[in-house]
């Protein structure tokens, strides 16, 4: 059994792990398609006792959630002759590609072999593991992520997109913090030589805000800047970011 996750985009499908971090919030949530290829791998040329097999159970566990997928196997497709295969799709799943998240999918099937010399129950298991969210440039191998939050009087952080509409006019203007998280996903140390952002047509050099320029493998540095936003006026604030390293 084999598992793949793809995002349908017109006439093509992009592997989930290759989807870039969307620039606009309305494009964050995307439908995905999990494709399961199930095969009866018994080869009659090697094993004269090969039998057909009937799939009687098909389950998957994704990030701890169990689901029965037998409904995806069409009637008649559950019986597999030797070397036959069937491809089934798990649709109706959406992921938020603006939030970094590890997706771990495990699937298991059980099948009964037809009456014959090798009567019994067989099982097959497969897994699919990937991370969605920002996909770093493969040449640079430095990932940059951005978060925006508001800190209240109690020190509680709230993501900017989750701040409720203020009830009083004197609560409209709030100070926000933008945190740019630069992660070295390479196997060797990286030196950051440029970090820039663009917001509402204004560019800003943030290299001097970075807490460290030499980043060991698997570790990160953070640059922070503050701004004031009127939360009583609904608007989309777009922030572009770019980085250079060697």
Image (cartoon, rainbow, N blue to C red):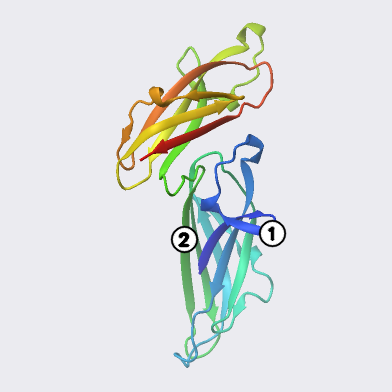
* 171 to the left or right of 63: right
Residue under label 1, please give it.
11
* 129 to the left or right of 193: right
Please tell me which residue is depicted at 47% across the width and 76% down the height of the picture.
122
Query: Quick check: 49 above or below 15?
Result: below
Looking at the image, which is closer to me, 6 or 198?
198
Please tell me which residue is depicted at 59% across the width and 27% down the height of the picture.
161
Figure quadrant of the C terminus: top left
Please tell me which residue is depicted at 66% across the width and 37% down the height of the picture.
26
Looking at the image, which is closer to me, 123 or 205?
205
Could you classify mark 1 by the number of other residues whose Cα lies within 10 Å: few (under 14), some (14-19), or many (20 or more)? Answer: few
Residue 21 pos. (x, y %): 55, 42
Query: Quick check: 52 above or below 135?
Result: below
Q: Is disc 2 placed on a helix, strand or loop? A: strand
Residue 49 pos. (x, y %): 48, 91
Query: Quick check: 37 above or below 114?
Result: above
Please tell me which residue is depicted at 55% across the width and 53% down the height of the picture.
16
Residue under label 2, please give it.
127
Residue 219 pos. (x, y %): 33, 38
Cα separation, mark 2 vs mark 1, equals 27 Å
Mark with earlier residue (2, 1): 1
Q: Is disc 1 placed on a helix, strand or loop? A: loop
Q: Nearer the viewer, mark 2 or mark 1?
A: 1
Looking at the image, which is closer to me, 147 or 41?
147
């Amino acid at each position: 059994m084999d598992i793949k996750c793809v995002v349908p985009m017109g006439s093509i499908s992009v592997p989930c792990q290759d989807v870039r971090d969307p620039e606009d919030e309305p494009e964050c949530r995307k439908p995905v398609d999990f494709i399961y290829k199930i095969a009866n791998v018994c080869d009659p040329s090697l094993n004269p006792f090969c039998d057909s097999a009937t799939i009687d159970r098909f389950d998957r566990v994704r990030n701890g959630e169990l689901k029965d997928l037998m409904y995806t196997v069409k009637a008649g497709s559950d019986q597999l002759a030797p070397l036959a295969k069937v491809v089934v799709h798990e649709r109706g799943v959406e992921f938020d590609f603006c939030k970094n998240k590890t997706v771990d999918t495990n699937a298991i099937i059980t099948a009964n072999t037809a009456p014959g010399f090798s009567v019994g129950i067989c099982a097959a298991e497969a897994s699919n593991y990937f991370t969605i969210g920002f996909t770093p440039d493969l040449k640079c191998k430095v990932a940059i992520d951005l978060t925006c939050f508001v800190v209240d009087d109690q020190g509680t952080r709230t993501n900017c997109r989750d701040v409720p509409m203020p009830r009083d006019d004197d609560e409209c203007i709030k100070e926000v913090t933008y945190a740019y998280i630069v992660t070295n996903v390479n196997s060797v140390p990286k030196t950051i030589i440029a970090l820039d952002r663009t917001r509402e047509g204004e560019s800003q050099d943030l290299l001097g805000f970075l807490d460290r320029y030499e980043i060991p493998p698997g570790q990160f540095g953070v640059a922070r800047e503050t701004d004031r936003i009127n939360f009583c006026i609904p608007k989309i604030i777009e922030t572009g970011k770019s980085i250079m390293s060697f």
